Structure formats: C-alpha cells, structure tokens
Image (cartoon, helix red, strand yellow):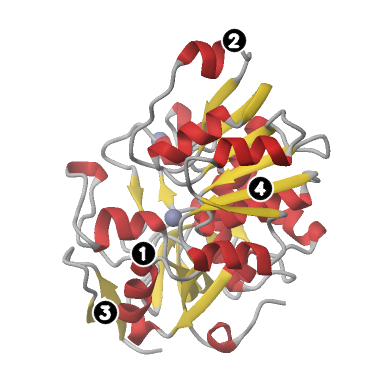
Amino acid sequence: MEKTMLAAFLPGNSSVEMRTVPVPSPQHGEVLLRVKASTICGSDIRCIYHEHLGKGPEGYQGVIAGHEPSGQIVEAGPGCRLFKTGDRVIVYHISGCGVCNDCRRGYMISCTSEKYRRAYGWQRDGGMADYMIAEEKDLIALPDELTYADGAQVACGFGTVYEGLEKIGINGNHAVLITGLGPVGLAAAALCRKLGAQRIIGIDVVDERLKLAKDLGLCDDTLVSGEENVAQIKALTGGFGVERAVECSANAAARATAIRATRKWGKMVLIGEGGGMQMNPSPDMIHDQKTLYGSWVTSTWLMEELVERLVRWNLHPADIITHRFALNQAADAYSLMASGKCGKVAVCADGELTAMSK
Ligand SMILES: [Zn+2]
Ligand SMILES: [Zn+2]
C-alpha cells in the first residue's frame, strides 16, 4: 500500500490547496477507509471555502476538508467490535465523546464535550483525500443496494432532512412547501415523495435548481422566489395553504413565505442554517395554531433507519448529484458548488467516478 496520499485543504480565500500527506494508520477503535465518494455541503462553502467563519472549537482547524464521506474499510485498528476490512460504510460526520447526554441519544452533532467533539472536515481530517481515519462508533453500514455516492449523501444532507421530516410528520394528507431547492431542498422533495406527500411545491431563485426539481420529478409545482409566493401557494391549495413547510433556504423572505403559506394547524420545520427571520406572532403563528420546529442534523440511529428505508423505497440519493470530479480536480468541484449552478457536487474515486446511481 502507498505511503502518501493526496488531500484537499481549504485556506479560506475561495481556493483549494492540494497537498501530499502521509497515509495515516488506524489506532484503537479506528478504521482506515479508502474514500470512494465525498460530497460538498453548503456549509463547506459558507463557513470554510469563502472565509473561515466561526472561531475556536466550532471553527475549521485547517484539517483535510470534507464531512460527507463514504468508503470501504481497508484496515481495522485494534479493538474494533463490529466493522472489518472490506466493509462498505458511511461516516456520521461528527465524532462525539460518546458519553454525554446528547451522544447517548445518538446526537453527536450536539456533543457537549469541548475536548472530544470533533467534526470530520472541520476539527479532524475529513474525506477529501484518498484515505481517511474514522472512529468505528461513527460508522453506519452501507447496504449493497446503495452506491458509495448514495452513502455520501446520507451522511449530512438526506439524514438532516429525514430528521426534520420525522419531526413534522409527512403523509398523503399533506401539501408540502419546500423553500430553497439546493441539495437539501431536493433531498426534502425526494423524501416527501416517498413518504406519500400529495403535492410538493418548491421555491428557489436559481433557474437551474427549479429546472432540476421539475426534471427529476421531485416537485409538482416550482415557483420563482418573489413577493407573490404566498398568494400563488394559496391558489395551488384551494385557498388554504400547505399543511407542512420545510425551510431549507436560510433566507429571511423565504422563511416569512413558509410561515404565511402554512395553513391553520399546520407544521413547519427550519433546517437551513444562518440568516434571520421576521414574523408577527399573532397573525402568523398564534391565531392559526401553527407549530414551528427547529432541526439540526440527525442521530446515528435515525441515519441507520433512513438507510434501511432508502433500500425499501429504491430511492437513490445520488440522483441529485449533477457533477462528479476526481480528487485532483477538487478545486473545480468547490468552485462549481460555490456558483450554485448545479445539484450536488461529488469528489469520487475508483468505480464511483464514472458510475451513475443504480
Ligand atoms: Zn454537510
Ligand atoms: Zn458527547
């Protein structure tokens, strides 16, 4: 096996720095993965690629980038209990202490240990490399029916969405509004479809995204973001508004639209990160008996459940990947993702580079 590997770092000035670094070896309870697919997240662009937002333990620590990896175990360190060489796996993207209350619930995203909480691609080396080290406790088995590119999409995007949708509950009684049709919004549409939503309405500002949502059959109606959106949505829903709204844009105007286009007794979940929000509690929420949820990433057990459902539904998250790049073209991959004129962007290796999803 080779001693060195290629790895991508993000210096924070909208560029990517490729370096050759030693291939690490797994310590107790860790595995070495051959990274097969590693997708780029909106948060990578917003908080690391353009500039390093967030300082201290929450900030990017100059490590190998990439928090949405999927790969195959090439070496299991001593003390591994379940996973072994050859296993196909997804990495839950935040490694927690394992013993705080949040970690015990499976929500390592909100691990309260300042010393041990380290996200892959932020505070510890991530997946934009030929190989990566992951802790066994952070691994989810990837079923044979799903590709590595499918798996990379589960780690952050689809898992985050599934958690939010579980909170508000989606079924065949529901018209659903999705604000923001980036990769997270598209994932929301794909999952709402499988959960039986009766009508799916999507809003975005970027033409490429609206077209993708239509072409993939994920939205029944797509609307260009604008002041008339609430009236348009009411017209599409018999004057009532939607029963469920999923906010993926982080845009203040879109959030206001989502709240006002949700009908009486409806439920809404905030998933998109950052930005602000303005509303008038009495007319917008209280008098119409609405419920608003916040939802942050997901848990390891719900991620496992999602993987099982994806197989059952024959749903392939990689379908929303529009562009694949080799690791040595990582700079092009980040720059395309930053432009927004794409679906999901993946850096892939071996068979995943040329493969389409199953
Ligand atoms: Zn992500
Ligand atoms: Zn913890």
Q: Is residue 260 visible?
A: yes
Residue kind at label 2, given as amino acid type: His
Q: Is residue 236 above or below residue 8?
A: above
Q: Which residue is mark 3?
A: 22
Q: Quadrant of the C terminus?
A: bottom right
Q: Which residue is mark 1?
A: 126
Q: Which residue is mark 4?
A: 201
Splitting the image into 4 quarters, where does residue 332 fall?
bottom left
Residue kind at label 3, given as amino acid type: Pro
Q: Nearer the viewer, residue 93 or 186?
A: 186
Q: Position of residue 321 (x, y in %)?
A: 55, 71
Residue kind at label 4, given as amino acid type: Ile
For label 4, the crowd category at 10 Å Cα-Cα, with few meaning under 14, some 14 to 19 and many 20 or more, is many
At horizontal 70% and vertical 48% (from top left) the residue drawn is: 200
**Label 2 with label 4: CB-CB less than 8 Å:** no
Splitting the image into 4 quarters, where does residue 178 fall?
top right
Q: Earlier in the sequence, mark 3 or mark 1?
A: 3
Does residue 322 appear left or right of residue 196 in this picture? left
Mark 3 vs mark 1: give the one in front.
1
Q: Position of residue 129 (x, y in %)?
A: 36, 76
Q: Which residue is mark 2?
A: 287
Q: Nearer the viewer, residue 272 or 54?
A: 272
Q: Is mark 3 within 8 Å of ligand 1?
A: no
Q: Position of residue 192 (x, y in %)?
A: 71, 47
Does residue 198 appear left or right of residue 250 in this picture? right
